[in-house]
Amino acid sequence: MKQLVILITFLLLYSCHFDNKSTNKTRLSEDSLEKIKSDSVIKKLSGEWGIYSTNTTTITTVGNKKLETNSSTLCNVCPKVIFDSTRLGTVIKSSSDKESIKWEVTGNKLKIIYINNSLDKTFPDSVYEMNFTQEKTIAELNLVQLEKKYSLTLRR
């Protein structure tokens, strides 16, 4: 009987033993989920987009007052942006000139950096907040740069 009690006690203690391996599996799963989300955004972003419009907010100080001016431009002959899955891209201007960019996605942020240091960039190197929308056959990507109060609307 004493051996049976020891055996049951041992089994109970062993079954309650904390296993670090299960915690690591959970952590790997969270990392895997983040990678899946990132891959999904990269898949959505990859391909050719036309720059549909740009919006800029300019703040001018006159005396003690700050005046905010919003300007919006709809593109007649739209530049195109091609994001490829290798995290490189090309901006094709309406003049057919090409600009090379590198890009990186973190959460809902898109970082764009020009590879060639051209003075006449289509849009500034920066980190943009991304917002995807889909209406019937038109996919729209809104990129907002909050610090410089600049935004782009891309469509395909």
Image (cartoon, helix red, strand yellow):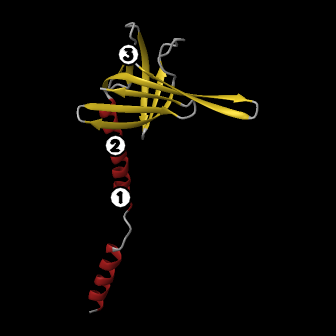
- Between disc 1 and disc 2, whose residue precedes? 1
Left or right of 88, for residue 70:
right
The quarter of the rendered structure image containing the C terminus is top left
Circle nearer the viewer, 3 or 1: 3
In the picture of the structure, the residue carrying the numbered disc 1 is 21
* Percent of width and height locating residue 84: 33, 23
| Residue farthest to the right, as pictured | 63
Q: Nearer the viewer, residue 119 or 20?
A: 119
Q: Residue at left 55%, top 31%? A: 149
In the picture of the structure, the residue carrying the numbered disc 2 is 37
In the picture of the structure, the residue carrying the numbered disc 3 is 76
What amino acid is found at the position of numbered circle 1 in the picture?
A: Lys
Circle 3: is it few (<14), some (14-19), or many (20+) Cα within 10 Å?
Answer: few
Quarter of the figure with residue 77? top left
Circle 2: is it few (<14), some (14-19), or many (20+) Cα within 10 Å?
Answer: some
Q: Secondary structure at mark 3?
A: loop
Circle nearer the viewer, 2 or 3: 3
Q: Residue at left 43%, top 30%? A: 104
What amino acid is found at the position of numbered circle 2 in the picture?
A: Lys
Q: Secondary structure at mark 2?
A: helix
